[in-house]
Image (spheres, grey):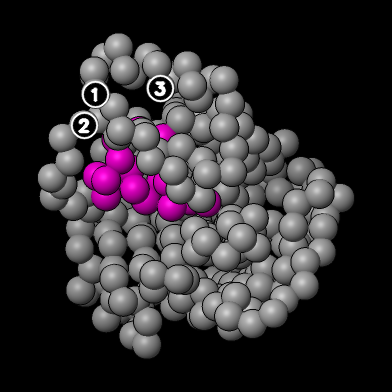
């Protein structure tokens, strides 16, 4: 199923790019977050494909809310953000992704993140490692998996690097950065949108990602699976409790990728 999930993420990404490269309109949801045709097309491709090829239910950002009374009985399910970083999409800065994760017993055990602008795919399966595939387009999922690089990649960076959100910052984030300065001395700060931040930590470009601003479960699940397979921890601000899924509220508490 991993190969099929890869193909669905890429197909959704290509549909997103067709909208991205043409004039598009923007709607706003009740929480004032933006919604575009790209979100809707990506959702349709992924949810239809997963239901066709998998027996597990699907929970996606762009679908009617599934009551907790129903989903609390889901042992295994797909968790999808069809377009993570719609604000970045609207700004046309390229920093948006497609996120697909498989949740089992409240934990992400598979994760797939596709960066449509770069044609780059990150993915992980529990116990099998995390991988990066460049130019991941016009290829079958199995071919991509056979040629992907294992993460983390070799890195030449010297200073401790923290990656933070491009669209969200907070006093808690600044406090975390100051704490790391005391520990490591020289610090580099990088900014990125969407789940790309998880990918930068997983590949070794960055060392930590503090998130002291609101996120939803579909924002983090795929990235957590990828980061954890490289030996990183995705934990609450206490530094030890793992981020978990299928909670009654789908809003994440603050967390750290370290």
- Label 3: which secondary element: helix
- Marks 3/2: CA distance? 13 Å
Q: Quadrant of the C terminus?
A: top left
Q: Does 135 sit above or below residue 229? A: below
Q: Which of 103 and 203 is in front in this view?
A: 203
- Marks 2/1: CA distance? 6 Å
Q: Name the residue under label 1.
A: 186
User: Which label sits in the foreground, 1 or 3?
Assistant: 1
Q: Which mark is residue 159?
A: 2
Q: Pointer 3: residues within 10 angstroms few (<14), some, or many (20+)?
A: many
Residue under the point 40% across and 22% down: 177
Q: Does 114 sit above or below residue 203? A: below
Q: Do the residues labelled 2 and 1 touch (CB within 8 Å)?
A: yes
Q: Which of marks 3 and 2 is nearer the N terminus?
A: 2
Does the segment drawn in magenta span residue 204? yes
Q: Going by the image, does 232 lie left or right of 209? A: left
Q: Which of 81 and 177 is in front in this view?
A: 177
């Amino acid at each position: 199923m991993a190969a099929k999930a890869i193909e669905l993420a890429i197909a959704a990404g290509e549909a997103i790019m067709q909208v991205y490269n043409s004039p598009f309109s923007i709607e706003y949801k009740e929480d004032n977050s933006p919604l575009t045709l790209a979100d809707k097309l990506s959702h349709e491709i992924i949810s239809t494909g997963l239901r066709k090829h998998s027996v597990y239910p699907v929970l996606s950002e762009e679908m009617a809310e599934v009551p907790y009374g129903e989903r609390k009985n889901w042992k295994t399910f797909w968790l999808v953000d069809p377009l993570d970083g719609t604000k970045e999409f609207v700004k046309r800065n390229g920093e948006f992704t497609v996120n697909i994760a498989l949740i089992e017993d409240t934990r992400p055990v598979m994760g797939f993140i596709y960066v449509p602008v770069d044609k780059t795919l990150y993915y992980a399966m529990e116990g099998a490692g995390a991988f990066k595939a460049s130019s991941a387009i016009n290829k079958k999922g199995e071919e991509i998996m056979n040629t992907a690089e294992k993460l983390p990649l070799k890195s030449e960076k010297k200073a401790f690097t923290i990656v933070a959100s491009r669209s969200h910052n907070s006093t808690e984030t600044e406090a975390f950065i100051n704490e790391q300065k005391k520990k490591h001395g020289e610090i580099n700060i990088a900014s990125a949108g969407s789940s790309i931040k998880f990918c930068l930590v997983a590949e070794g470009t960055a060392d930590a990602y503090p998130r002291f601003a609101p996120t939803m479960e579909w924002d983090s699940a795929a990235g957590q699976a990828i980061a954890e397979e490289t030996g990183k921890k995705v934990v609450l601000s206490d530094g030890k409790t793992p981020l978990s899924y299928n909670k009654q509220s789908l809003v994440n508490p603050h967390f750290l990728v370290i």
